[in-house]
Amino acid sequence: MNEPSGRTTGPRQPAIRVVLMPKDTNALGTIFGGIILSYIDQAGAVEAHHHVPLPGRLVTVAMREVVFHSPVFVGDLVSFFTETLRVGRTSVTIKVTVEAERSTGSGRVKVTEAEVVYVHVDRNNQPVPIPPAPHSPNPLSPGPPPALPGREGA
């Protein structure tokens, strides 16, 4: 089932914001990519929980399309913006865009982006259906079938 998030948005707000510190650096003196990936996972989970309210359990099953565009430096204020791309039967796919406001005052730069897939699980870590959104007209409707590559409109 493909559903829009159903949330209205005003000015874009980050899911999380952090100032990165010297402890987060790699051997080159820039922020270690694993630190950025960890925050991407956290920010994506914040967005995914709009579809699976707490105490619902979500686990990360995939990080796809991770692209590091530019390094992050100590002192940068880093914002993690999220967008729901897809809500399926048991999974949610979130796009996370990472921007850094340079501590040098040289402006804001897109530094990383990724897609993260979370699965709703029970206490035994088995996938379970995501509850239907309250605005969903027919929670049992799976929506249109996905298009096959090279077969648009078929």
Image (cartoon, grey):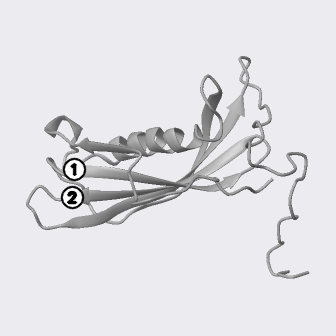
| Secondary structure of residue under mark 2 | strand
Location of residue 108 by image quarter: bottom left
Q: Is residue 154 above or below residue 146?
A: below
Classed neighbour count for the residue bearing mark 1: other residues with Cα under 10 Å, few (<14), some (14–19), many (≥20)? some
Seen at 66% across and 46% down, the residue is 92
Q: Position of residue 41 (x, y in %)?
A: 48, 41
Q: Is residue 109 above or below residue 39?
A: below
Rendered image: mark on residue 77:
1
Between residue 5 and residue 126, name the one nearer to us: 5
88 left or right, relative to 23: right
Classed neighbour count for the residue bearing mark 2: other residues with Cα under 10 Å, few (<14), some (14–19), many (≥20)? many
| Secondary structure of residue under mark 1 | strand
Determine whether label 1 and label 2 are within 8 Å by CB. yes
> What residue is disc 2 on?
101
Location of residue 22 by image quarter: top left
Q: Is residue 50 above or below residue 76?
A: above
Q: Position of residue 12 (x, y in %)?
A: 40, 59
Seen at 12% across and 67% down, the residue is 106
136 left or right, relative to 112: right
Q: Position of residue 56 (x, y in %)?
A: 65, 26
Outermost residue to the left: 104
Quarter of the figure with the C terminus: bottom right
Rendered image: mark on residue 128:
none
Of callouts 1 and 2, which one flags the residue occurring earlier in the amino acid sequence? 1
* Amino acid on which disc 1 is placed: Leu
70 left or right, relative to 102: right
Between residue 9 and residue 25, name the one nearer to us: 9
* Amino acid on which disc 2 is placed: Glu
Between residue 96 and residue 148, name the one nearer to us: 96
Q: CA distance from mark 1 to mark 2?
A: 5 Å
Between residue 51 and residue 151, name the one nearer to us: 51
Q: Position of residue 34 (x, y in %)?
A: 37, 43
